[in-house]
Image (cartoon, coloured by chain):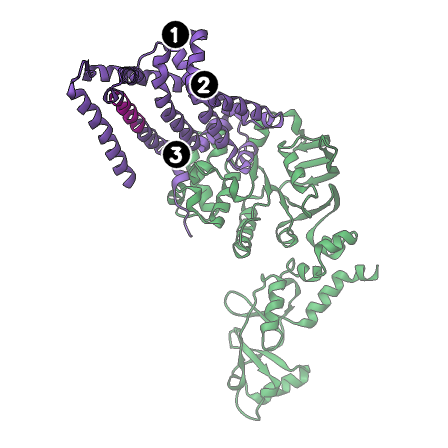
Chain colours: A purple, B green
């Protein structure tokens, strides 16, 4: 309940700010962006985050499954892969996006690939952790009853690891909403364009006009993914222990 | 039938977990693999359903080499139960039990009926209610029952059980063991059961395979193992109280004195005194006209006049012909006279258990060893 109040207050503040600044219209020789501009840039922003996350989820979860196999742990592949994904996150986000442009050209794909690299680690790490946290006795029971490897992953491991994986996706998404604002540096659009306009014209209100919806977007996505995480948590993991 | 021939497991690092174990479990037999931790009993068990690959040797089930079948097909035909932590926490009790039937693609309706049948068998009633619960909503004992039911899911002829009652409190464990014996009497599966608890092994097993450092030390019936331990290790493992443990294997009916002399409650005390003196005993069981046991007549309570009923000591403890001897012995110590009356369902006196008789029987079964 308290969480929900905090959520609504924050969301209301950011959306209110954006609406108020949009309503001002003229700021000296500059004019603020219109409501239409805001909606369009928010849409583009969402597209960047969505595409980047989609690839990050597919790659991150698959890699997570692979590196949590016993043979991958024996051969230390897990350590190498998780370490490599960690390095991706160590590169400053701004540098990462800037480095993508010469490779992939300016525009959409440079942004999406940078967001994918940046969002991969939390998902991969959580998938790996989620699989590793499963009691080996459960896996052994499944094996002993004649489930194939694929059946064990699909019916046992993925459902049990799902809450942890979802938490990773949530972290990754929220971080990437902020990172996507840097798309403007490599010829992209999105809410970063409004923020940069404000910076270059020395109009803090215009900067805020881009920053407030970015924050609102992060808050909304965080809330929605949290709800989804709860929905996707198997019921059997949520029930209270009985004292019978 | 399960046959292990010279079964050996050597790990890549050179540890020999199991060395040349040969044993045979007949159809419908309950075999217990017993031994201290690290003796190779669990490894042996897991080699039977190929969870652990053999290094050398051969295992056959009903004459078929287990390496001639697909491992998943093999496992779907062998029930497997481990401690309660092996339940799938995200599945309901019903879904857990339905695991193997679902793998075998049974029709839905048949699975539902089977789940209910099994829940009833393991005493989780009403089945409709328990079927929908999650493992986290059950007590440890209930979860273990689910584990047993799940192993029985597709009605496999063989059950492998790896310390299934290990994590349960002693009282619940005893009850689960009793229930499981009752179930086994009904379903007559071929069972291989791993435990490190000698009492559990003696109670459950038709045969006990005692292992040490990967080797099979002695493979014998519980009575044989207790009466004639093969060497010092077995003797130590079964414990200095092995005679007392053996008592559990006997029932009162096998040891009691049948048709003991009695005295009727309505008889005059003078007649009772005469009977006591003639028999040369200090106590006599008192019965009513229908032969129902009422209590004890103690020689020291005799009076010159009156009837037996007036001076008799009412009984405090009783046994039935099916009471295990270890419980009976404990009751004898509680009994006022040191003897134990054995009655049937209607309360009629069936026999008498005395310390002298108990001593005779035990001395007989342990005599051979005493001479050796």
Quarter holding the C terminus of chain B is bottom right
In reply to whether residue B106 is colored magenta, the answer given is no
- The dominant secondary structure in magenta is helix
Say whether marks 2 and 3 touch (CB < 8 Å). no
Q: Earlier in the sequence, mark 2 or mark 1?
A: 1
> Which residue is found at the position 63% from the left and 44% from the top?
B194
Q: Nearer the viewer, mark 2 or mark 1?
A: 1
Q: Splitting the image into 4 quarters, where does residue A175 fall?
A: top left
Residue at (23, 17) in percent of width and height: A39
* Magenta highlight range: A208-220
Q: How many marks?
A: 3
Q: Are marks 2 and 1 on the same chain?
A: yes
| Residue A240, picture quadrant | top left
Residue corresponding to mark 2 = A117
Using the image, name the chain to which the residue with label 2 belongs: A
- Residue nearer the viewer, B115 or A33: A33
Helix, strand or loop for disc 1: loop
Question: In the rendered image of this protein, does residue B171 appear above or below residue B25?
Answer: below
What is the distance, in whole Å, between disc 3 and disc 1 at their CAs? 40 Å
Instruction: Say if the magenta span includes residue A219.
Output: yes
The residue labelled by disc 3 is A233
Q: What residue is rendered at 66% in x and 37% in y? A: B1
**Residue denoted by label 1:** A106
Whole-number angstrom distance, CA of label 2 to CA of label 1: 17 Å
Q: Is residue A153 above or below residue B338?
A: above
- Subunit bearing disc 1: A
What whole-number distance in Å separates the C-alpha atoms at marks 2 and 3?
27 Å
């Amino acid at each position: 309940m308290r969480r929900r109040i905090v959520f609504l207050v924050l969301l209301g503040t950011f959306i209110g700010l954006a609406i108020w600044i949009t309503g001002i219209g003229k700021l000296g020789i500059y004019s603020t962006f219109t409501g239409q501009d805001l909606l369009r840039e928010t849409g583009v922003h969402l597209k960047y985050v969505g595409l980047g996350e989609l690839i990050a989820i597919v790659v991150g979860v698959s890699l997570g499954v692979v590196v949590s196999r016993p043979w991958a742990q024996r051969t230390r592949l897990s350590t190498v892969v998780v370490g490599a994904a960690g390095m991706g996150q160590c590169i400053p986000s701004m540098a990462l996006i800037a480095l993508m442009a010469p490779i992939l050209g300016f525009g959409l794909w440079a942004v999406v690939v940078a967001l994918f690299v940046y969002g991969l680690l939390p998902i991969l790490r959580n998938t790996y952790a989620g699989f590793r946290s499963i009691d080996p006795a459960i896996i052994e029971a499944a094996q002993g009853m004649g489930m194939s490897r694929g059946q064990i992953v699909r019916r046992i491991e993925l459902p049990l690891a799902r809450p942890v994986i979802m938490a990773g996706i949530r972290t990754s998404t929220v971080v990437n909403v902020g990172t996507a604002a840097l798309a403007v540096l490599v010829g992209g659009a999105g809410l970063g364009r409004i923020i940069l306009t404000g910076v270059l014209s020395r109009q803090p209100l215009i900067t805020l006009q881009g920053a407030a919806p970015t924050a609102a977007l992060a808050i909304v996505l965080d809330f929605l993914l949290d709800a989804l995480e709860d929905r996707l948590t198997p019921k059997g993991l949520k029930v209270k222990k009985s004292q019978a | 039938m399960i046959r292990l021939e010279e079964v050996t497991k050597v790990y890549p690092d050179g540890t020999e977990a199991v060395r040349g174990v040969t044993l045979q479990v007949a159809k419908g037999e309950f075999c217990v693999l017993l031994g201290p931790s690290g003796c190779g009993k669990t490894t042996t068990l897991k080699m039977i359903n190929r969870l652990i690959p053999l290094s050398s040797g051969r295992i056959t089930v009903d004459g078929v080499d287990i390496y001639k079948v697909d491992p998943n097909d093999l496992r779907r035909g062998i029930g497997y139960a481990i401690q309660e932590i092996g339940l799938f926490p995200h599945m309901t009790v019903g879904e857990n039990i339905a695991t193997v039937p679902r793998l075998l693609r049974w029709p839905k309706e048949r699975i539902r009926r089977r789940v209910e049948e099994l829940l009833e068998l393991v005493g989780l009633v009403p089945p409709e209610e328990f079927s929908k619960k999650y493992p986290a909503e059950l007590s440890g004992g209930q979860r273990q029952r689910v584990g047993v039911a799940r192993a029985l899911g597709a009605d496999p002829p063989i059950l492998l059980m790896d310390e299934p009652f290990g994590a349960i409190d002693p009282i619940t464990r005893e009850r689960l063991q009793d229930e499981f014996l009752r179930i086994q009497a009904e379903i007559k599966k071929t069972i291989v059961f791993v435990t490190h608890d000698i009492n559990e092994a003696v109670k459950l097993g038709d045969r006990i395979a005692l292992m040490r450092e990967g080797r099979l030390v002695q493979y014998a019936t519980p009575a044989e193992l207790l009466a004639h331990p093969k060497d010092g290790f077995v003797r130590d493992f079964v414990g200095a109280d092995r005679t007392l443990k053996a008592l559990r294997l006997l029932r009162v009916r096998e040891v009691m004195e049948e048709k003991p002399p009695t005295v009727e409650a309505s008889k005059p005390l003078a007649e009772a005194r005469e009977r006591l003196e003639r028999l040369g005993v200090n106590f006599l069981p008192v019965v009513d006209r229908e032969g129902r046991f009422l209590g004890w007549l103690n020689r020291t309570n005799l009076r010159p006049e009156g009837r037996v009923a007036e001076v008799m000591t009412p009984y405090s403890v009783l046994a039935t012909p099916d009471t295990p001897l270890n419980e009976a012995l404990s009751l004898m110590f509680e009994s006022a006279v040191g003897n134990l009356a054995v009655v049937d369902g209607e309360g009629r006196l069936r026999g008498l258990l005395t310390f002298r008789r108990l001593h005779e029987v035990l001395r007989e079964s342990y005599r051979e060893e005493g001479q050796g």
